[in-house]
Image: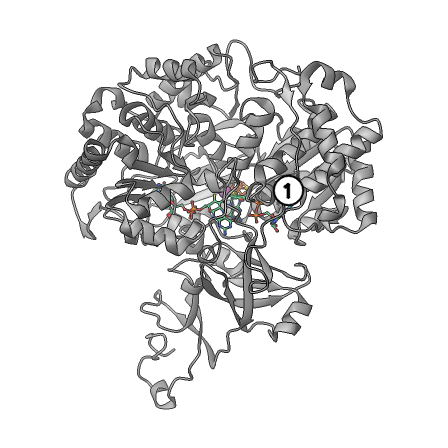
Amino acid sequence: MTAIRTTCPYCGTGCGLLVTPDGKGGIAVKGDPAHPANLGRLCSKGTALAETVGLAGRILAPQVGGQPATWDSALDLVADRFRRAIADHGPDSVAFYLSGQMLTEDYYVANKLMKGFIGSANVDTNSRLCMASSVAGHRRAFGSDTVPGTYEDLDCADLVVLVGSNLAWCHPVLYQRLAAAKVARGTRVVVVDPRRTATCDLADLHLPLAPGSDAALFNAALVVLADRGAVDARFVADHVTGFGAALAEARASDPALTGLPEADLATFLDWFSSTEKTVTVYSQGINQSSSGTDKVNAILNCHLASGRIGRAGMGPFSVTGQPNAMGGREVGGLANMLACHLDIENPAHRAAVQGFWASPTIADKPGLKAVDMFSAAGSGRIRALWIIHTNPAVSMPDADRVAQAIRACDFVVVSDITATDTTRLADVVLPATAWGEKSGTVTNSDRLISRQRRALPAPGQARDDWRMIADVAARMGWGEAFAWPDAGAIFAEYAALSGVAGGLGRDFDISGLHQADYDALPPTRWPVSAAKQGGRFFGDGRFYTPDARARMLPITPRLPEARTGNRYPFRLNTGRIRDQWHTMTRTALSPRLSQHIAEPFVEVHPEDARDLGLAPATLARVTSPEGSAILRVSITDAVQRGQVFVPMHWTGDTAPSGRIDTLVAGVIDPVSGQPESKAAVVALQPFGAAWYGFAVSAAAPALLQADYWATARHAAGHRTELAGLQAPPIGRLGPAPCSPCQMPSV
Ligand SMILES: Nc1nc2c(c(=O)[nH]1)N[C@H]1C(S)=C(S)[C@@H](COP(=O)(O)OP(=O)(O)OC[C@H]3O[C@@H](n4cnc5c(=O)[nH]c(N)nc54)[C@H](O)[C@@H]3O)O[C@H]1N2
Ligand SMILES: Nc1nc2c(c(=O)[nH]1)N[C@H]1C(S)=C(S)[C@@H](COP(=O)(O)OP(=O)(O)OC[C@H]3O[C@@H](n4cnc5c(=O)[nH]c(N)nc54)[C@H](O)[C@@H]3O)O[C@H]1N2
Ligand code: SF4
Ligand SMILES: [Mo]
């Protein structure tokens, strides 16, 4: 069979793939040499895609109240419950919680239904946990959520500063690209991260700054740019406002907040001030912070002051996490945006969107952001909630409370491909087609719009996400406005709306793309319009603010709050591992990917481990004011004293006591509403297991009752680690099933 050109469903690098179906439900996957994002390269997760497309565990039919149901009865119920909530309690009593992994077409339909027809802006997305601070920082500085540069800038920069980004594990193909640039032209690399990560292998300098102190670092950089004559006075005079106030505030801030050794700080400031071709890449170490938006603006200040923006080899570069995090921002997935980078607060923008949609209404104020949305679901303010393509019972901060809120909410619908901690709390579960079974577009970190193309048939009764939403819209009485025959027709409508936005002077304009282009659409960088094609933004010094000038902001560094004195003396940093994707519903299906790290862990500094009496490879109990977890101890000086690191991936299905978001407080950035996922406060103690064990089983273990267990795919089936506080009675360990785990003895 011939290979189908498509795009990887994992990270925002957006690698192109060549997928060849074998005709028996399987596929072979290769990197697409013609895709500009990866030029044929793939990472471990992309390479293992073929191992994760089987139908094991897939939801194949709608379920109502845990029982199989027909599509008609399930969709009638969803439409009826949403309609009743709106009639009785108003449009703001319903909400959608979406995902940066949805296709642009799915997002467009959901956003149109909620903002234009239901008339509420209660449509938010897991991008609130991910990109919201970057979005808010961009909008404050540029007047729009615009990523100025492209990946080519990494190829031709002289200095790349990676801030709060573990690129080696989280954007591995970009990391390989940077490594190649370093070999080719000696690019200097600086990693700014409290933790020594795999990415530091490439670094000429690692700055293990104090958690949350990035704004103090970039304020220091701004001062040095000014003092060493590296400010682009012309650019500032012609195109920037706020330089004086930002510099004054930067001078008032104390670089010692970073806790960095003076010599390392001085080296960084030397390199940063003297290298014109500097790209500052930033990710969750910046965004997931109670001062995330300020940190973003502290970085943008430096690039604006030095005029290092919009030209080859330089610029601030917020790399996106999910495959369509960028697309979701473009299409209006966030509760405080309209489609196509139009502003909800702007009456002319609202009128333009409503006019284009010929819709009965248009949301006129921002809706609830993720953390508030789930609080509202728990308190009865939200009566009907539809969760699509995300697993908030695991990934939201204060996850037990979020699970409680989903349980308490009158009516919850979840669209997923497999059973999860979230689907188990839903009134209605709708089976979605997965990657490989559906068609649409995604936008990656450098504004390339790429096609995902169908390579496999839809299994069972699974339906595309956009179609379920359109089916419900039709049942709510709006069939005509939601009557697209296919994803290409949705894209065409979206592209036309972006032309309206372009006409209003917005950056996002793809009106040059038409339905006829859709099937064969090659990776295409936006904008695509009569006025502009691809390329970088802001080289001409024109920004999207009313006076067309960028804004520098005075930034006062704010460290994470102490909250609870000495009872919780450690900072909990959380993040990702190389071979698992988020809540593991797909990557954990691959034995190969499970080999890298098979169990949740807590990284502890050797001196802290000694003081706490934690021995290597034993278990620790980690406690916060919100909850508690049991994790395997990994002793390493990659973390600093007083800090611990735990991965975010494990769930009720894979290691119930390793669900780390049950410990993370719902503290948010006041501007972006993004949670501080990287600086909770915790205490540690030995778990004190009376016994440890492991089991290898052909089938997935069921009904595990041990105090601690974690299970992973293995070449032989499944491997499960177990431990308990009480020694099992000796007599029970005979031929009968092992009592702690209820598994046949092996
Ligand atoms: N393998 C894999 N890759 C992925 C994903 C995945 O699940 N697995 N998910 C994708 C998604 S959605 C996202 S958003 C990206 C995330 O990509 P990254 O942001 O690179 O990943 P994280 O591990 O969340 O966090 C990055 C680093 O921030 C550091 N950090 C913590 N606090 C601070 C701080 O105060 N300042 C600074 N400077 N750094 C700090 C952490 O130590 C961590 O190493 O990854 C994408 N890629
Ligand atoms: N402590 C801590 N928490 C974090 C983070 C952190 O760094 N630390 N990072 C945050 C970030 S950046 C992110 S992006 C989130 C990610 O968190 P989530 O979005 O909750 O994680 P995923 O596992 O990607 O969830 C995707 C869900 O969609 C389902 N799915 C897969 N394909 C399809 C499909 O085609 N259609 C539908 N309808 N469903 C599908 C999957 O089975 C899965 O249940 O986690 C956030 N939470
Ligand atoms: S780098 Fe990201 S997009 Fe590329 S193959 Fe790996 S996970 Fe997929
Ligand atoms: Mo993310």
How is this picture coloured?
A: one colour
Label 1 Cα crowd, 10 Å radius (few <14 / some 14-19 / many 20+): some
* Kind of residue sitting beneath label 1: Tyr
Q: Is residue 525 visible?
A: yes
> Which quadrant would the N terminus be assigned to in this image?
top left
Q: Residue at the location (84% across, 26% down)?
A: 229
User: Which residue is under mark 1?
Assistant: 175
Mark 1 Cβ inside 8 Å of ligand 3: no
Residue at the location (53% across, 47% down)?
A: 676
- Please state the horizontal and vertical placement of residue 331, each as a whole percent of the image: 42, 26
In the image, farthest residue toward the bottom: 731
Left or right, 713 with respect to 206, comes to: left
Quadrant into which the C terminus falls: bottom left
Residue at 71 percent across and 14 percent down: it is 238
Residue 366 shown left or right of residue 71 in the figure: right
Q: Nearer the viewer, residue 453 or 344?
A: 344
Q: Residue at x 47, y 30 (%)?
A: 329
In this rendered view, identify the residue nearer to me: 233 or 413.
Answer: 233
Element on which disc 1 rests: helix
* Residue 439 percent across, percent down from the top left: 37, 31
- Name above or below for residue 545 compared with residue 724: above
Relative to residue 205, is residue 710 drawn left or right? left
Along the viewing direction, whichever of 609 and 162 lies nearer the viewer: 609
